[in-house]
Each structure stands twice: as structure tokens, then as C-alpha cells.
Amino acid sequence: MAESKPKPKIKKEAEPMPKQKPEVRRKNFNEVALGYSEEQAKTEANRCLQCPKPQCVTGCPVEISIPEFIKLLREGKYEEAAKKIKEKNSLPAVCGRVCPQEEQCQKFCILGKVGEPVSIGRLERWLADWERKRGNVKKPDDPPPTGKKVAVIGAGPAGLTAAADLAKLGHKAVIFEALHLPGGVLVYGIPEFRLPKSIVRAEADYVQSLGADLKLGYLIGRIHTIPELLKTGFDAVFIGTGAGLPAFLGVLGEHLGGIYSANEFLIRVNLMKAYAFPFYDTPIRIGKHVVVIGGGNVATDSARSALRLGAEEVCIVYRRSREEMPARKEEIENAEEEGILCKFLANPTRFIGDEKGWVKQMECICMELGPPDESGRRRPVPVKGSEFTMDVDTVVVAVGRTPNPIIQSTTEGLAVTKWGTIVADENGKTSIEGVYAGGDIVTGEATVISAMGAGKKAARAIHEYLMQEK
Amino acid sequence: MYEIVGKRELAPKIKLFEVNAPEMAEKARPGQFLIIIIDEKGERIPLTVAGYDAEKGTISFAFNEVGKTTKQLGCLKVGDSVQSITGPLGNPSDIRNFGRALCMAGGVMIAPMLLQVRALREAGNKITVVVGARIKELLFYEKEMKDLSDEFYVATDDGSKGYKGLDFLKEILSKQKFDRCVAWGPVVMMKNVCEITKPFGVPTVVTLTPIMIDGMGMCGVCRVTVGGKMKFGCVDGPEFDGHLVDFDGLINRQRMFLPEERLSSLLWELQGGCSCGGK
Ligand SMILES: Cc1cc2nc3c(=O)[nH]c(=O)nc-3n(C[C@H](O)[C@H](O)[C@H](O)COP(=O)(O)OP(=O)(O)OC[C@H]3O[C@@H](n4cnc5c(N)ncnc54)[C@H](O)[C@@H]3O)c2cc1C
Ligand code: FES
């Protein structure tokens, strides 16, 4: 392929992402963003200034050599470019789709000061897709086995990354996943229209091809405990069990029919494919007036899923204002294009049911923003006497997720914070020798890429620990 | 994949399966449950552990063929497999010497109760067993239970065998003091038992069967109100103090997907259901 020199004059606008039209996509579960064409990828890559001191890299939690992979891409060396990314990130097809790039690499891109930053995430996605479609995903040579065995608990991004890196170092990694499919949030939480499940599958298959074993349907803490694993042949353990417990609002009427936790709603739709009921056995019931409580990715994903399941009207109710919404910017825009409504500065105070025990109304109170809280965001405070009611028949509560306590309560000596997260140092080392942890289970709800970064660091630390052992 | 190595019809439409699952066979305890998925399109259904044999490496569960999934499951034969089983899940029952225990089981729950009765007996309890069903044809394990108990009663809703309804319990309870009552069965039965034991001050444990998906605390669909607080059936239970459970709320939540369940079941029948002829 011909080498194309960067043009002297740089375009201020990024190449737009081709997408399904809003009126079409709001009726299907196919991926919304269609991905760049080869030409678009090259055009966008040519916008990169190849800064001598690239700031983008400092914004990347796993420090991908961004300018280098972009350079390889524009030289047409796709295979090498993909390899460059994979040196640091073993799940690029996922991260290219779900990372909050505007908060990370792209936030630091110099071009962002004069126009739009380089679309680093879209380029990452394009390369990963190119490699996968070619059907010849490069696998490193098998390392000499070390004879050490590591149990990895949880097959989310943290666990999959840790297992992949451990396998690449010659250790036998055995992944124990409680659900019947691997991927963690990638398979049960993030919807098909944002992250096709075939991609998650391919990534999990890749990790297994490296030599890691995957055991599904194993809830550690019940079938085996960590002390048992350490006694029965495992030399170390990595805990990547995520933040899988749903938070509820704790208001009156939350037991009513038609009220789902976002986890329940998304598990039905994504993991169990309830959108294809009755061809798949798990049902879901969507009413006409759906409200989703919350302002993060989980809320936008739930709202957009509800729309696709046939709701007449979907409204996101968030207690802060638009600026504070933690969801990815691109997804908020997508949601609005699709016709999702937003009601800001409001919070539910109770749910009212009909005679059959089904929710029919939601009472809310208006909020105003006070001074900033510990998270740096302005704290919402209720406005006295401002209650109002909305007619609703389906409610999805997406107000946060906390760690599952099963492991913590069955592992004596494992230090835990008051929020239930596991205490670990920057390398994932916990209070128990040989036991490491990383991802949402340590940080609380965070991002795919930070969970992967934690899995990577822990794998390195576990390697050192195992090799120094007598 | 988990292979079915044993299949028995306990009563019409009530089946007991034994499957190969060595690791679970070693870990399971009375009161815990399993989540079963038949195939790729299947839903996740919870079923109480009805037996385990660590030496043979097998685990058993019983079910009533009421909906699509249980009907489909009932059609599988020895040698067939189910895609996935997760377990054991939930807290094991509290088994120790309470003194005198009243064990009441209704319908399909008679099967797992046998395990509980055996364990309580081994722990040294004196045991009164009551097995119940809608009609006498649906009773099973009478001999097994009788052999394990000090006192044994049968009750049916229609009075076709043993006592009619549960009123006779009051007599039993006024004759002697019980230190523990374990009631497993349909929600309405457990609710009634709890209403009867409460005035006698007999601590009563029930096992709840809300709708479940993951069975490990992730979705919250199994939430029940116990003592005014929200609890998750799968991880806080499945057993709870029956005198604190909001049974009506539970019944309401269990009915949430009835129309969908009916549709699913009808479609299954329309497609020919199964051709095994109930074998
Ligand atoms: C709906 C939704 C949308 C999101 N969108 C984005 C996004 O766009 N971008 C982004 O960067 N982040 C997003 N996030 C956050 C991101 O998905 C998480 O931060 C990330 O997945 C955490 O990875 P993890 O590996 O730590 O945990 P998880 O992905 O939660 O995986 C943990 C795994 O461990 C398993 N497990 C738990 N306990 C046990 C046990 N005892 N034994 C065995 N297995 C166990 C669980 O079943 C699960 O599979 C989103 C989250 C949700 C819920
Ligand atoms: S079944 Fe999902 S939380 Fe209990």
C-alpha cells in the first residue's frame, strides 16, 4: 500500500463515525456505530501530528504507544499497528468501543485545543476489527511452562487480562467464572448495540488459546473458597470479581412489579437475550412509559435498550444536571438522537402501585446543586415541597453497583474497606500472601480499561512473586 | 455439560434427576440450591438440592413440570446432558440438635426435605414429619420419611389421604412442645404453617422460591421483604424466619411474568412439546 504523507494543512474536524440512522437503530439491537472504512481510518490517522512528546499517552491508563500505532496505520502496516496496541492492551476491539476516550487519551491530544482531537479510539477499533475480520489473530509463541498454577476469579476485563498475561509468562491460569458465559460486564451489562457479543466471545477465545482454562458456573466462595484453592495446588490467586451488586434507592414501593434493578434489566436483555423472547426462554416486560433512574453508562444503556424493546417513551431521571452525567459523551448524544428524554435535577421519593402490585406512578422531588462533595461534583439537595408525580409502568434503577461480598466473607484475613472493596496496593497485592486483586472489586465501579490495567499489573506482580519463591 | 445419570418419576409430573457433578457433590449441603440451564436458549432456573453422593460424584434435584423449562427438562433422558449447572448456591440449612423438630414438606419440596430430615436426625433431633400434597396421587417418599421420623403424618388439600388441610397441626402443636419447625413447600402452604406456629411460639424456618436469575446477588429480582427489610432470596436465604416474611409480597412478585410464562409454555406445546411420552 502506498505511503501517504501527512498533509501540510490539518483538518480541524475528526472523521465522523458512520452510524445506523436513529430512526432505524432505535428498532434493532445491531451495533450503532458501524466503524470507519479503510480510507476514513487513513484520513483520520493522517491528522495525527506525531508529537515528539505525546500527551495522549499520559492519558491512557495502560500507556499504549499511540503515535506509533497511528504511524504504522497510516503507513499501511496494519498488522504491525495492531501488534503495537496489543503489546499493552489485549482487548482492543472492546476498548476501541467502550473506553471514555474523551476523558483519557483524546483529552490530552494537542489538536483538541484548536479543533477536535484525533479519534484514537475509533482507530484502535478499526485495527482490531481489521485483524479479527482477517481471521488470523496473531498469537505469541508458547512460552516455556513454569509449572506454577494461578486461579483467576471472575472472567471480566480484569480477570481475562490477568489470565492472558499470566499464560503468556508460562503460568497455568485457571479462570473461575460464576456465570455461564465469560466477559463480566462486557457480556451481561453492555448491550449488543454498543458491543457485539461475538467480539467478547472472540476475545475470551483468544485468552483461552493462550493456554488459560475457563471454568464456567463456578461461584468461588461457595463451590471452593480461596483458602481451599491455595491448599489444593494453586500457587497464587487473582480476584477480579467486579462490582456486581445492584444498589436500590431504598424508597417506598421498590418491591412493586415493573421495577427492575439495571443489573436485572440488562442481564435479562444481554446475557439471557430476552429481546428474542420467546425464542430465548428468558422474558422481559416493557411498558409504555419507562423511566430510568441514574446518569451513568448503565442508565443510558438501560434506556436505549428499553426503547429498542418497544417502549413508547423513555425518560432518564437524574438527580444532578447534564454536565455531571458520568456516561460516555458519545453515548449520551446517541441516546438523545434516538429520542430518549432527560429529566435533570429530580430524584424519586416513592413508587405507587396498582391493585395488582404493578408500579403505576413515581413520585419525585426536585433537586438543586449545592457545593461540591468528595467526588468533586456538586452535591444535589432536595428542594422542599417540590414533589411531583409521573405516570410510569416500567422503572429501571441504575443508581450504582457495589462489590459482591461472597469472596470477602469466605476468605479469612482478607482486608476489606468500609465500602466492601478489597484493599490492594498499586500492584494488586492484598493482605494475604499470594492473593492479588484488581478491577472494580478494588476501585469500586470504574472502567473497562482501568480494570484491564489492574489485571496487567497484578499479573506482573504475581509473576515476580511466583518466580522468587524457592 | 452435565450428564444425567439417573431419572425417576416421583409422582405424576414430578421428576428426580441425578447428574454427574463431582465437585458439587462434595460441596453441597441441605438447604442449598442449583441454577440450571438446559441449552443455549434456556433460562436460568433455581432448584433445591435433593441429594448428593460424593463417592459417586453425583448431585440430585427434583422439579415439578409446570412451565416450559421444567417440561423440557422432564423430557431429557438418562445419557442426555444439560448445558450448565451452577452450585451449590445459597446458605446451607442450620443443622444441629434443636431437640424436637417438626418438618413439613409440600409438593415437590418433599424431595429435598428428605435430605433435611436425615441430617436433622443424624444431629440427634426427635422428628415429626408431615408430608402434604394437593391430592393423594401427588404424594411420594411416604415410606422413606416414615422410617426416618418418630411421628409421621400425611395431609392433602382435598382430604383424599390423611388429614384434610393443615388445621390438625394445631392439635399436634398443643400436645407437645416443638423447638423448631422447618416448612418447605408452596408459598401459600408456608404462609399458613407460619400463621399456625406463630401463636405457639415455635421458631419456623421457610425456604423461599422467588424468581431468580443469577442466584448470586447480582440482579435483585429475588428481593423479598423480611422483617420490613429488603433481602435477596439467593444470597441472604434461601431460608428465612417464616414469622418475618412478607408472603403476600412474595406471591405478587412470583406472578410478575405469568403471561410470558404461559406464552412460552403454549409455544412449547404447539411445537410438539416432547415425544418421550413422559418416560
Ligand atoms: C451497563 C454498564 C455499562 C458500562 N459501560 C462502560 C463503558 O462504556 N466504558 C467503560 O470503560 N466502562 C463501562 N462500564 C464499567 C465497566 O464495565 C467495569 O468497570 C468493568 O467491567 C470492570 O471489570 P472487572 O473485570 O473488574 O469486573 P466485571 O466486568 O464486573 O467482571 C467480574 C466477573 O466476576 C464474576 N464473579 C463475581 N463474583 C464471583 C465469584 N465469587 N466467583 C466467580 N466469579 C465471580 C462476575 O460474574 C463477572 O463475570 C459499564 C458498566 C456497566 C454495568
Ligand atoms: S437471583 Fe439475582 S440477586 Fe438473587
Image (cartoon, coloured by chain):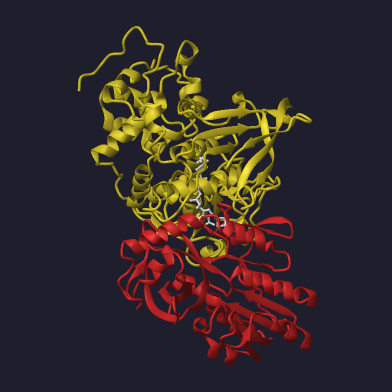
Chain colours: A yellow, B red
Query: Residue B203: in sight, yes or no?
Result: no
Q: Is residue A397 left or right of residue A145?
A: right
- Count of numbered circles in the view: 0
| The N terminus of chain A, quarter of image | top left
Q: Quadrant of residue A136?
A: top left
Identify the residue at horizontal 64%, vertical 46% (top origin): A248
Q: Is residue A256 left or right of residue A451?
A: right
Identify the residue at horizontal 63%, vertical 90% (top origin): B149
- Nearest the eye: B107 or A45: B107
Q: Residue furthest top?
A: A9
The picture places residue A223, in percent across and down from the top left corner, at: 52, 66
Relative to A45, say whether A402 is above or below.
below
Q: Quadrant of ligand 2?
A: bottom right
Relative to A266, say whether B232 is above or below.
below
Query: Residue B74: in sight, yes or no?
Result: yes
- Nearest the eye: B14 or A60: B14
Q: Quadrant of residue B159?
A: bottom right
- Nearest the eye: A154 or B160: B160
Q: Quadrant of residue B152?
A: bottom right
The picture places residue A108, in percent across and down from the top left corner, at: 50, 20
Q: Is residue B161 left or right of residue B95?
A: left
Q: Residue furthest left?
A: A1
The picture places residue A65, in percent across and down from the top left corner, at: 40, 28
- Nearest the eye: A283 or A47: A283
Relative to B19, say whether A399 is above or below.
above
The picture places residue A351, in percent across and down from the top left corner, at: 67, 44
